[in-house]
Image: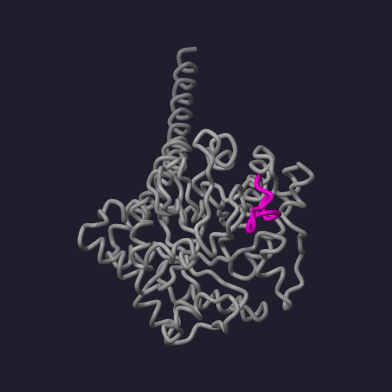
Amino acid sequence: MKKVLVRLAALLLALLTALCAYAETESGSEKTAEERAQAMLSAMTLREKVGQMFLIRADALDFTQPYTQVNDAWAEGRTELTEDMKQALADYPCGGVAFSSKNITDAKQLTKFAADLQAASPIPLFISCDEEGGLVARLANHPAFHLPRYESAGAVGASGNARDAYNMGRVIGGYMVDYGFNMNFAPVADVNTNPLNPVIGSRAFSSDPVIATEMAAGMAKGLKENGIIPVYKHFPGHGDTAQDSHYGLAVSYKTKDEMAACEWLPYVDLARDTCVMTAHIAVPNVTGSDLPATMQEAVIEGVLREQLGFEGVVMTDSMDMGAVTQVCPAGEAAVRAVLAGCDIILGPEKYQEAFDSVLEAAEMGDIPMERIDESVMRILLLKIESGLME
């Protein structure tokens, strides 16, 4: 009997040891990603770090193009990676590239362009575009592609069934990944509460904040399941404005409590494998300022991070939009956005100027090194945890 008890005790000890080892492995999986990101961060130069904080238009790597052409969606665009563009990427490294319709001719060309960009970058790039479904869909609306099309997010959201948005995310994510994309500037998480809004409208899933929240989450889940990083937009909420921030400052006059009960619901407790895109809108009754939210620490750090608990990557909306360019030059705008808490500068009006300004501000101490490092750490973690580093 004594021998049996000894054997049972030994067996239990072995089982407990194995369970403890398994638990340590499981709890260490997140830590391993953080350790990998920290090791990469420690080995990077400041220039490389700053580069990770820019997600640029494909044409921005063609330094022969005037910035007006780079930012013009209807102008002629680059459709392949030239040797000069490779050198530009080496001199001005970036963290990601966004494709517009003008950079796409057909499936074969697009896939090669994306693959060539990845091959030219030492750190894997975010490869992205706007593929919301409906009016804004760079791939599905392109004449060279025969892909599933959606009337609009609003039409999908009319059912009130989040499964429909999930299925849309699955479909869109399924074809995006085939062409080399790993990020989508979607879902539109705005709540369409202003019928006079000239830019959101049916791009939003609903005028009901609860339905909009459920639908955005459904689409995001579908995208993630196909390896596409979702980007919720446009925080703190573009749905109640009566202006289009592409052409000038848009304003929401809602109070903090009003926005918390409506516009901010989709952003509560978002996982860090999701991105959030800021809106170039002023919220004077929240911040006491007429500056765009993209440049407001009270919005990015105070509301999104501290109040809503978001720990992931925050990127700006495209910085070539009128709401930004009418406030300050490209370099100053980028620095202000970083100081406000944004991790990625999307589509700066003038890439080299914006890059140089952020780099110089970091070198001079105007942007604390801790501010740079925390952004790059978030970016690297997202790339690792989303499988881009595999």
Residue 85 colored magenta? no
Q: Quadrant of residue 211?
A: top right
Image-based side of 362 in relation to 283, left or right? left
- Vertical relation: 185 (above or below) 16: below
Give the main secondary structure, helix, strand or loop, of the magenta stretch.
loop
Furthest-top residue in this view:
1
The colour scheme is one colour
Image-based side of 236 in relation to 373, left or right? right
- Vertical relation: 203 (above or below) 6: below
Q: Position of residue 70 (x, y in %)?
A: 49, 78
Q: Position of residue 240 (x, y in %)?
A: 60, 47
- Residue at horizontal 37%, vertical 77%? 90
Most foreground residue, 96 or 251:
251
Q: Quadrant of residue 21?
A: top left
Q: Position of residue 256 (x, y in %)?
A: 49, 36
Image-based side of 107 in relation to 181, left or right? right
Most foreground residue, 275 or 260:
260
Image-based side of 264 in relation to 376, left or right? right
- Vertical relation: 252 (above or below) 170: above
- Residue at horizontal 43%, vertical 31%? 17
Q: Which region is colored magenta? A: 193-204
